[in-house]
Image: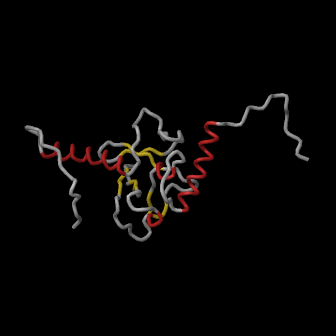
Amino acid sequence: MGEFDEELSLPERQPGESDDAYWRRVGELTDRAEALDAGADADGPPARPVCRECGLEADRFETWFGAWVLLERLDPVAEVPAHMVPPFFRWVIDRAGMACWTRDAEPSPGAMCRIPHRLVCPGIELPNPWSWLASVRSENARAAERLYNPPPPREPDEGLPDVG
């Protein structure tokens, strides 16, 4: 059995609210809070799935109760071994394409997960990032630089440079 946070408090039940309606509302509030706590909250459609800090596009998923999360696109894979990701940063996508935050649950052997974009966002300073996350962050910084400072367009009569 798990332990409850001392700060956890359930919302007041509305007069005449059914059990189903009450627990759905609790789930919605929990999902949004989890997305914020995990640093993965995102704007839902029709907004573009881009990071508010660096402007890079990422993969956006809906949670079971309608919150939206922004997860990193990793190339050439989308998921990484869960044991390589710090606790509280592991997200799992179910068969229906919905995102679920695993918090600090110990991953099973061979488990794969997604990571929030903010974990490797070049616009956010994190203390002591894991080495592989630092390399993804560096690549994202280069991508963001190219996004905001594209190379100047070449003149049509310039032709190709002489390379030898």
Instruction: Identify the image quadrant of the N terminus.
Output: bottom left
Q: Residue at x 53, y 39 (%)?
A: 55
Task: Say whether residue 42 is left or right of residue 53.
Answer: left
Residue located farthest toward the bottom when viewing the structure as drawn: 109
Up/down of 69 relative to 134, above or below = above
How many badges with numbers are in the image? Answer: 0
Q: Position of residue 93 (x, y in %)?
A: 40, 54
In which image quadrant can residue 108 be found? bottom left
Pick the residue in front: 124 or 60: 124
- From the viewer's perspective, tell me whether residue 144 is left or right of residue 67: right
Q: Is residue 103 above or below residue 147?
A: below
Q: Residue at x 18, y 47 (%)?
A: 23
From what the image shows, is residue 73 above or below residue 160?
Answer: below
Residue at image coords 78%, 32%: 154
Residue 15 position, x and y percent, is 8, 37
Q: Position of residue 100 (x, y in %)?
A: 35, 53
Residue ranking furthest to the left? 16
The image's colouring method is: secondary structure
Above or below, 104 against 73 in this view is below
Viewer-proximal residue among 123 and 45:
123
- The residue located at (47%, 39%) in the rendering is 52
Q: Quadrant of residue 29?
A: top left
**Residue closest to the far right:** 164
